[in-house]
Image (spheres, rainbow, N blue to C red):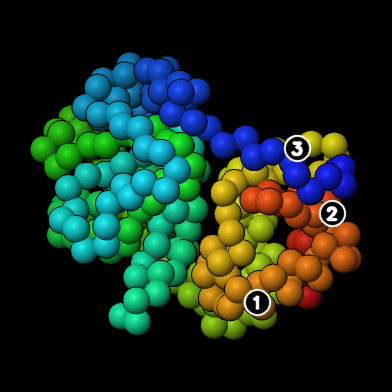
Amino acid sequence: MGSRKTTPLNNPTLENLHCSIELKTEKLGMVPFFQDLKQPELDKVVEKFSANHFSEGDEIYYQEDPAHYLRVIVEGAVKLLRYTDEGKDVVLDILNPGSYFGSLKLLGSDVYTESAVAQSGCCILSIGLKDFKEVLQEYPAVSIALLESSSEKLRASQEQVKQLTTQSVEKRIANILLTLSGKFGEEKDGGTLLQLPFSRKDLADMAGTTTESASRVMSTFQKEGIIETGRQWVAIQDIERLRSVTKS
C-alpha cells in the first residue's frame, strides 16, 4: 500500500447509488432465510419490499421505536447502536449490503432493541408485517430458515459478549478489523483497503474500550507495519500478522 494519508474515501452519495431491481434481487438473495429461493421466487418477494435512500448520518430508526419493518441493505453501510442508561451509545455492528436488520412483532420484539444509523449513503429495502406474513405463508421454507438465522445471530451475539469480557483490547480490535475487512475490504496494492466513515470512537465502542486505548492499539499496529491509517480509512498491510494477534 502507498504511504499517503489522504486517500479519498469512496463514500457513495445518493446520486451514484443505483438501486436497480437486479441489484435489489441480488442482495435480497444474500439474506440467509431467502438464499434457498429460486430466482422467480425472489423476483416475486422483492416486489413486497419498498426501497428508501438515506444520507450518511441519517437515523433509520431509534431504539424503543415500535418495530414495524424488517430491512435489507442494498448499497452502503449501516451502523447499529444501543444507548445505555448513562446516555452513552455503544456500537454493536456495522452492516454491509446483503445484511438484514430491524424487526417485526412476529420475530419476538414489539420495539427495536437498537438504533440504526446510515454509516454512508444507503439504499435500503423495507418490508412490513402484513407483507412479510404473506411471504412466510407462500414460502414455508423461509420460516424454518428464519429460525435458524435468528439462532445464529443469538450465537454470534453471545460470542461477542464473550470476546468483550475475556479478550485483551489488542485481540478485540484485531478481530474487529478482520471482520470489517471481510465485509468492506478492497484488495489493493497487495493489501486490504477498508474505506468507511469509521471513527476511533466507533472502533472503541465496538471493542468495549476507551477511545484513547483504541488509538494506542492502532498506533502500535501501524508502527509494527500491520496497518496504515488515514482519515476514515485503514489499509491492512499484513493480514496474517493481524490474524496472529487474535490467536496469541
Q: Which residue is mark 3?
A: 187
Local secondary structure at mark 3: strand
Give the percent coordinates (x, y) of residue 11: 57, 37
Which residue shows up at 61% across the image and 55% down it? 179
Q: Give the SS element for disc 1.
A: helix
Q: Is residue 62 left or right of residue 220?
A: left
Give me the C-alpha separation between circle 2 and circle 3. Answer: 12 Å
Quadrant location, the N terminus: top right
For mark 2, what is the residue?
238
Q: Amino acid at mark 1?
A: Glu
Q: Earlier in the sequence, mark 2 or mark 1?
A: 1
* Vertical order, 79 against 125 (above or below): below
**Label 1 packing within 10 angstroms: few (<14), some (14-19), many (20+):** few
Mark before the other along the chain sequence, 2 or 3:
3
Find residue 212 and name its label. 1
Q: Nearer the viewer, mark 3 or mark 1?
A: 1
